[in-house]
Image: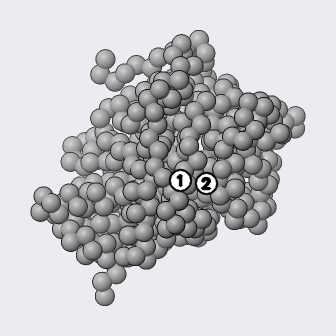
């Protein structure tokens, strides 16, 4: 049999998360004056137990047993080898992928959703408010809140709300409430709609609405939850890479030569890449590639700067690669990658030369997704197609160089609820968009007066 899948025994599930921040020259979030913030500045937004995790300097953090009990419903997830794609490409490369589509929500997102819901419940919180781009995070958090006993409200970016209606149904099925963003429910939403009633929305807007809804709740029992970007989210996702390390050994491999993941806010990429980044820091020769859309080129064209995480400027100033907090990306179908900023940990690792980011065109990614479906079989999420497109580039490069290599990527989610995008691609109705330089400069203008983070090596 050609098909290869590697399964870890249940008792091999990781029992600790890995904190890459312990190895990086991380810089703190600051207020408008440039003064580093303390935990109290975040207390209205997040429960204190997650704030402590956000700022924790320890390299390893124990995973509570109740969280392990829940995520063991689908973890450890399988590591598979893409032998049929290898054959089609006639490449000497061996291509492995971590299949995160096997979770109940169909993506990697429940790895952090369960953890965040559990910590909120432990702190006495009753209601969680969040945002979602393509709907993967909103569905995952609705699922987690249903299991743990919390109410969940989701502000979903309008273009994805319209493009992906069944993700809204998933949220409702698990008890979540889903609202298109921008909405008339918040001051942030009303302001944006007054400026442009037809806006496609953005994650920055949806985050602003969700934070406003959380901090203005008078009960004291509501907190905000974020599906990517923040340190504790990166932490929770590292179960992916920690499992993959063990599975590669089971497959007779040592370390991969190339590690690839799509990158919007950074969570699925970090989950796979961070455990291998530790090896790279300590001398391993591994190329690590975060892949983003050409239409939203945060780490390939944005500056490393202090910026807000949301349009409403309710977060602290965060050190990250950014296109400007008011940036509204074009309505590409990879809704989960339409974020103006990149996770501080991922940003700092790029600063330190540990990652080599890449931006790809929408149609190139759909071409890769079609090839994947017609060789390997599964239909991937539009976000995941960015990773697959980069994998194909690397596999072809290995063929041209006549060099064996091991390529590992994160299959971050299935695309069974994203068929409208495939339909448009097959009908020739999708186009590419490269962000004009003048639009980028205009988007960055508001942050020019903000405090500046230290550039690594200066």
- Farthest bottom residue in view: 1
Does residue 105 appear left or right of residue 452 in this picture? right
Q: Position of residue 302 (x, y in %)?
A: 44, 31
- Residue 446: quadrant of the picture: top right
Does residue 151 appear left or right of residue 59 in this picture? right
Question: Which residue carries the number 2 mark?
Answer: 134
The reply to whether residue 454 is in sight is: yes
- Relative to 327, residue 59 above or below: below
Q: Dot 2, how many residues are within 10 Å of its Cα: few (below 14), some (14-19), or many (20+)?
A: many
Residue at the spot x=69%, y=65% of the render?
Answer: 166
Q: Dot 2: what SS?
A: loop
Front position in the image: 439 or 46: 439
Q: Dot 1, how many residues are within 10 Å of its Cα: few (below 14), some (14-19), or many (20+)?
A: many
- From the image, which quarter does the C terminus lie in? top left
Residue at the spot x=30%, y=83% of the render?
Answer: 2
Residue at the spot x=62%, y=41% of the render?
Answer: 203
Front position in the image: 147 or 330: 330
Q: Position of residue 266 (x, y in %)?
A: 48, 45
- Relative to 359, residue 352 above or below: above
Q: Position of residue 324 (x, y in %)?
A: 54, 28
- Farthest left residue in view: 402
The reply to whether residue 236 is in sight is: no
The Cα–Cα distance between marks 1 and 2, rounded to whole angstroms, is 7 Å
Mark 1 in CB contact with mark 2 (< 8 angstroms): yes
- All told, the count of numbered labels is 2
In the picture, the disc for residue 94 is none
Residue at the spot x=17%, y=63% of the render?
Answer: 399
Does residue 345 appear left or right of residue 130 in this picture? left
Question: Which residue carries the number 1 mark?
Answer: 334
């Amino acid at each position: 049999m050609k098909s290869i899948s590697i399964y870890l025994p249940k008792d091999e599930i990781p029992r600790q998360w890995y904190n890459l921040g312990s190895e990086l020259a991380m810089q703190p979030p600051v207020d408008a004056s440039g003064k580093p913030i303390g935990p109290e500045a975040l207390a209205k937004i997040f429960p204190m137990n997650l704030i402590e995790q956000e700022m924790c300097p320890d390299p390893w953090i124990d995973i509570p047993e109740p969280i392990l009990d829940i995520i063991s419903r689908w973890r450890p997830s399988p590591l598979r080898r893409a032998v049929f794609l290898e054959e089609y490409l006639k490449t000497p490369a061996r291509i492995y992928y971590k299949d995160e589509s096997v979770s109940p929500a169909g993506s990697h997102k429940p790895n952090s959703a369960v953890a965040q819901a559990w910590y909120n419940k432990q702190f006495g919180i009753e209601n969680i408010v969040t945002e979602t781009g393509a709907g993967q995070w909103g569905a995952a958090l609705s699922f987690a809140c249903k299991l743990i006993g919390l109410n969940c409200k989701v502000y979903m970016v309008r273009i994805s709300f319209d493009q992906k209606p069944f993700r809204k149904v998933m949220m409702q099925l698990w008890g979540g409430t889903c609202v298109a963003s921008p909405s008339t429910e918040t001051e942030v939403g009303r302001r944006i709609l007054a400026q442009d009633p037809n806006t496609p929305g953005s994650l920055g807007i949806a985050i602003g609405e969700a934070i406003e809804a959380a901090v203005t709740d008078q009960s004291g029992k509501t907190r905000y939850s974020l599906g990517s970007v923040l340190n504790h989210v990166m932490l929770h996702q590292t179960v992916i890479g920690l499992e993959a390390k063990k599975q590669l050994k089971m497959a007779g491999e040592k370390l991969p030569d190339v590690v690839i993941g799509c990158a919007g806010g950074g969570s699925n990429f970090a989950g796979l890449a961070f455990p291998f980044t530790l090896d790279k820091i300590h001398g391993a020769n591994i190329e690590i590639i975060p892949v983003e859309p050409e239409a939203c080129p945060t780490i390939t064209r944005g500056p490393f700067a202090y910026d807000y995480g949301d349009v409403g400027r309710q977060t602290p100033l965060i050190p990250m690669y950014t296109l400007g907090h008011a940036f509204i990306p074009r309505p590409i179908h990879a809704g989960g990658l339409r974020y103006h900023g990149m996770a501080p940990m991922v940003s700092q690792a790029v600063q330190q030369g540990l990652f080599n980011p890449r931006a790809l065109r929408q149609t190139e990614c759909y071409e890769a997704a079609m090839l994947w479906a017609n060789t390997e079989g599964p239909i991937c999420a539009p976000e995941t197609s960015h990773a697959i497109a980069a994998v194909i580039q690397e596999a072809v490069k290995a063929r041209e160089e006549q060099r064996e290599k091991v390529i590992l990527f994160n299959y971050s989610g299935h695309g069974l609820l994203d068929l409208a995008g495939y339909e448009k691609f097959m009908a020739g109705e999708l186009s590419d968009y490269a962000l004009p330089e003048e639009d980028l400069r205009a988007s960055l203008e508001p942050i020019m007066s903000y405090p500046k983070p230290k550039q690594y090596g200066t």
